[in-house]
Structure formats: structure tokens, C-alpha cells
Amino acid sequence: MKNRSILTLCAAALIGLSAPSCLKSYVEKFDTSASERLSSYLNDLGTMLSSEPYGWRMEYFVGNEDGDFGGINIALKFGSEMDTVRVMSEENATAAYTSHYVFMADSGPVLSFDTYNPIMHKYGTASSEYYEGRGGDYQFFIIGYDKEKKVVNLKGKRNGKFCNLYPLSEPMEDYNAKMFSIQRNFYVSTFEGEIDGKKVTGDIDVRNRQFTAHEMEAYGTDKDGKTLYDIANTVSVPYILSEKGLSFYEPLEVFGMSFDSLDFDFDLAKSDTTFRSTAAGISFKGGIPKDWLPYEFFEGTYALTYNVSTLGSGSTISGIELVPEEPGISYRAKGMSRQFDLLMEYNIRTGRLELRFQMVLKPGTNDPIIDEDRYIVVLLPWALGPDSGGLWMNSDLGMATEWNGNRENPTFKWVDNGGARNFITTSFLLYYYDTDDTADSPYYDSAEKYSFAGVGGTYQLPYLNTFRKTK
Amino acid sequence: MKRFVIYSVIALLGLSVTACVKDEMSENSVITVSQTKKNDFDRWLEANFLLPYNIDFKYRFEMNESDMNYFTIPADYEYSIVMAHLVKYLCIETYDEVAGITFTRSYFPKMFFLTGEWEYRNNGTIILGTAEGGKKIFLAGINLLKETLEKGYGDFAGNPAESLNHYFIKTIHHEFTHILNQTIDYPVDFAMITGTGYVADSWSDAPYNREFLKNGFITDYAQHSDGEDFAEMLSEYITHDQAWWEAQMAKAGDSARLIEAKLDIVRTYLKDSFDIDMDQLRATVLRRQNDVFSGFVDLHSLEIK
């Protein structure tokens, strides 16, 4: 009897279990599967991207826990075969690189730039200095796109920055040249203004594209009755340059006023920059670095001093003549050596001259000292210090002039140019670089047959000290 | 009555099962995969890797194939082509020649995956490549191949042949050794010879990064573990000539006997397990390396023969 009850209950349970499974009658909400719909979604986007006559611009925001590098304008022309893409960046006026891209169904629709492109992968490339790269993505979740408004919303898959695509209204070469010029000529570093009668000051880090505003608070007056201020609150946001001005990664709120962009007239950037947000009714007066000098100021004759050691024992190279090489861009420094000239580049953002890694003697140069044309000679940045002396063949590295503020008797101090986070250039060396492939040849070695001018000048230029204008 | 209930249960079970298979299966899969358009390189890979060896040579970046612990970037298209030629000529066809195509088809990894840069670790070391599960070899640093072939790279700057060897080709032979070991394990005796010398991740620290030969290891990395030691022994030996080897043994001094003892085990393992003569393998590798640097191999061609 007991068994029968159990069996009856089991039968009832089975009926109960099996009946609903067979009664499942559902209506398809979509005509096609999720996978097919995703595929169709991506095909439509592919057509939209490749059919835009001039291509697209990407507001490419870069950054991770190690640092934020702001936004870079990238121009992209997607191939009609939905396979290759041509890419340019505002960081270089003319360079263009073609690589591949693909749409993928990952944990959502993804646009992936899946073969190497020196622009698209620049900030994602790891190195010994940035072993996690610099926060640049090259795979993007497709958050959405609007065919009417022509905008594609992307989000970096690894670093999570939002990077939108907008159509270009002119050939990508023209757009890129324009943005290159804008970013190169933008060097406003400070600003000041008011919001609702409250004082606002701030800094613009043009190197890392960061906009920082300080809400100022009055705390008293000085002996002349002038109000004294202290920083009450600081807010910071990455920005990207646009043809109108600055566009922020996200709205910035200062003294309760929110704004996501500031317009200004680029033609006036050098002398009278005013940042405006018409919508927010904001106006800030921009300023340039305190020691900023125009290119023309540097033309003349100089004396350079350097120290043989950290303890002093200085040496001088006099009569160095700076002659314009590429106006607005660089000077040729004659007289640094009897054997060669050096190039000094003008950094418009800092208003300083820079002496950087460079080729002193190019391959094939008919040089009496090196009779074989397989050698070149380079000026190598040297992180010389009391306990170290690293060398790095890197064209970003070098030293810059820091002005003493005296227009009549200008003297500059040589300082590291900030080319790398963990390499402080204090000195330079002349090095051979052997372009021959044979195993026995040295790759590079001290170019001791070359020397700098000045009493006791050798192939070394240790501890650069001052650069004084004499004429 | 009891029997009736049992029959009822069975009938109901039958009904419930058959009632649920009424849907007709669609001929088309509802899953669609991302499709890339085949280019000349894809067709060349199909003819030279996929059809003859069933090897999938992945040169386009796939996050899922990469190690998410590292920040990697895609490989350069042009130099992926060069690397494919190098893998084919210096590795695949080397084993075809020495061990026969059946060996290559049986044991050579079924997937290559390329990325552009090294995998940087936060202790200052880099990863050149890895082998996984006896099936896949991951090769990093493809974007540095141009500089490697033209001028030499890193520690071997000025010496393109040794540079190519160290950063890429030796890596492939090293990883392939792991795959052979994953297929047939090597004798336990190997790990005993320098058993107390393995130092795991400290291999790149002083004094291990300098004293390895004197400690009985052919490279600094060989001190990581016996598995890496075995792979370093084989890959270093077959990618260098006898003069280089003897120079290393001279530097090793008394410890040369330890290295030679390990080399004998490697030699026997290859012969007994896979019928490969290690010295013939080395002669073939070196001859083919010489062919590459003599311009005998067109590393950019996509002509399908």
C-alpha cells in the first residue's frame, strides 16, 4: 500500500513536470536569431562607416591608472571592402598608415583594429617604461550608432574610455593638417576669470591634454588692500582640441556651473586668448607660460657652459651662433664643434629651445675622419648622475632652455626636456653607430675622434649648465 | 494495480519525451561568426600552412588568444608575412627534412598566434613566446622583426642573424620542445643533474643572470626550472654552431660536464622518442638560417606554388 502511494505520487509528479514542458507555446519576438540580428547590425554599421565619402574623425581618449593623456583627433577612412582602414593623427601632419579592422561579436558588438597601425596602437603599446601601455585602446565596444545624426558611440574594451566617431566634411588629409596646426600652435597654459562673481583660475597641461580649474576663495587682503585668494576646490578633466576650441571628456562643474566645452579663436591664441562658453555664460582669459619666448628671440650668439663633474670644474664653448634652419621650427647651432653643426628645435608650447638626440653625421657623409660611409655619428642623451649614466637612443629625449626672465641679458639654464618619465638627461655623448650588418662590427661605440669646441673639449658634453646670449 | 501505475509512468515518460521533439531543426545555424575578407596572405597561408599541415596561422589580433595579464598589440601585416615564411622555412620544413612530414603533421603545433610587442612583466623581464597544451605557439614582438632583420635588435644589435635566432627562431624551437615534452615526457634523470640550481623567477636577478654557465646552465633562463632548462638546451644547441657551443663550454669551466650530461639526455630523448638525430637537426637548421640571410628565401612573396 505504501509502495503504491509512492508510485502514484511519482506518476502525478511526472505528469506535473512533463505537462508544462509540452504546453510551452511561445511567440518569436524577432524574426531572426540574436546572432543574425547582431550580424545585421554590424553589417549596417560597416556600410555606414565605409560609405562616408571623406571618412570619420575619432575623438580618441587615452589613459589608465598610470596617467591620463587626454584626447587625440584621429582621422579614419574605412575601405569599401570592410577590411582595411587608413589612419592619420593630429600628432603628425602627413603620416598615414593603412591596416586592417574587423567587426566581432564578442561580449557585445566590437570594432577591432586587428593588425598593427602605428597610430591606432601607439598608446596601447607596452614598453619597459609603461609595461601596461599608456591606456590606448584598439578594440571598442559599439555602444550604439545613429544613422541620421551620423555618430558612432564607442567604448574602449580594455581601458574603458568613450571614443566617438563623427563624419568628416573634408578630405582626411586636409582635416588632419588643420588639426595638426591647431594642436601645434596651442600653448595656452593658464587661465583666469569669474563665475557668478567668484574667482576661477586654472592650468592647461597641453602635453597631456588636461584642463584643471581652481575655485578660489578670498581669505583676506594684502597691505595695498588687494584681495588674497586660496584654492578652495580643484576639478580636472581631459580635453580634446576641436576646430572651435576645447571639448571636454565629460562636463566640468565649477562653482555649480556645468560646461563641456570652451571655444576660443585660435588666431588670437598667441596674444589674446579668451575661452568662452556661450551656453554657460563663461569667459576666461588665457595666458601663456611665464618664460615663453617667441622663436625669433633665440637668434644670436651664445656661450655654453658645462661641468666636467657634479662638483663644478666648468668649461665653456663660446661663439655658438644660432642660425635659423627651418623658420619657426629649428636653429642650426654653429660652433659647438669644429667638425659638425647641431640642430636645436624650438618648442612652441614651452617657448624654449631643445637640444635632442640627433644624427650628427649621416650615412654616406664624405667625412675625413670616418673614411667608411657605413658609420653614422649620433648625439646621444646621457642621464649622467653621481651613481648612474644611462644612455638612450630616443629622439624625444634631450634638454631644454629655461629662461632667467631677463630680456636685456638673457641667460638660459639647461634642464631636462621631460621627454621620458624615468630618464633625466643631464649630458650628451657622441657615439658611432655602425650600419653594417656583420657580426664583428660594434653596434655603437664612443666617437672619440670627434670633439666639441672649447678648451679641453672631448666627445663628451657632461652636465650642461648655462646658455648665455652674448650678441 | 501496482503494475498499472508503473505502466502509466512509463507511458507518460514516453509521451513527455516525444511531445517535446516536435520542432523541426533549421538547416542554417543561428550562430554567425565574424567573417573577414580573405586576402592574398590568407590564401597563401591556406596553401602553405592549413592544407598541408592543418596549422592555423593567426596574424590578426584576437583578445581571446592573447594573455589578458599583459598589454599586447596586434602584429604588423607585412612582417606577419615575413614571420610566416621564417616559420615555414626555418622550422616546419626543417622538421620535414629531418624527421619526415608525418612527424611535422603529427607534432608541430596546430596554431600560431602573433602579436606585435613583447609581453612586458613588471619585474623588467619580457616574454618572447609561449606554448600551450601541445597545440599552440604564441609569438610576440613581430613589429620588431623589421629592425631585427635589418640591424639586429636589443642585446644582439648589429648581428641580425643572432638577433633573429635569439628573439624569434630559438623561441619557436624552445616552445616546440615544450610541445614534444607535453607529448612524451623526458627522463626524470635530467632534472637531477642540476637539481638544486633551479631558482624560478629569480633567474633574471643577480647573480643568476651572470653566473649561469658556471652553475651548469646554458642560459640564464634555463635556471627557471628543469622544463625550461630542457627546452633551452635543445633550442640553443640546434640554433648555434659547434664553435659557439665550445666557447660556451669553455666559459662554463668545470660545469661544462653538467651541461654536456644534460645534452646527452636531450640527444637520447630525441632519438628514442622521435627518431630524430639532434646533430642532423642542427646542421639543417644552420644551413637554412644561412639560406635566409643569403637572400635565398623571398620572405615577402605571396605567390602560391
Image (cartoon, helix red, strand yellow):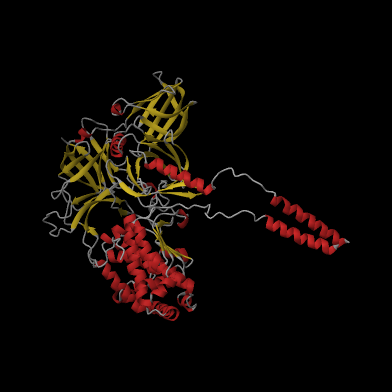
Q: Residue at x 38, y 62 (%)?
A: B46
- Number of numbered callouts drawn: 0
Residue that lies at the very extreme toward the top in this rendered image: A225
Q: Is residue A55 above or below residue B113?
A: above
Q: Is residue A180 above or below residue B206?
A: above
In the drawing, does residue B8 fall left or right of residue A399? right
Q: Is residue A177 above or below residue A265?
A: below
Q: Residue at x 41, y 75 (%)?
A: B102
Residue that lies at the very extreme toward the right in this rendered image: A1
Instruction: State whether residue B209 appears in this view.
Output: no
Viewer-proximal residue, A42 or A61?
A42
Q: Quadrant of residue A27?
A: top right
Q: Position of residue B171 (x, y in %)?
A: 38, 66
Instruction: State whether residue B87 appears in this view.
Output: yes
Q: Position of residue A11 (x, y in %)?
A: 79, 57
Q: Quadrant of residue B237?
A: bottom left
Q: Is residue B270 above or below residue A234?
A: below
The quadrant of the image that shows the C terminus of chain B is bottom left
Viewer-proximal residue, A212 or A145?
A145
Q: Position of residue A349 (x, y in %)?
A: 30, 36
In the drawing, does residue B15 fall left or right of residue A65? right
The quadrant of the image that shows the N terminus of chain B is bottom right
Q: Position of residue B41 (x, y in %)?
A: 34, 58
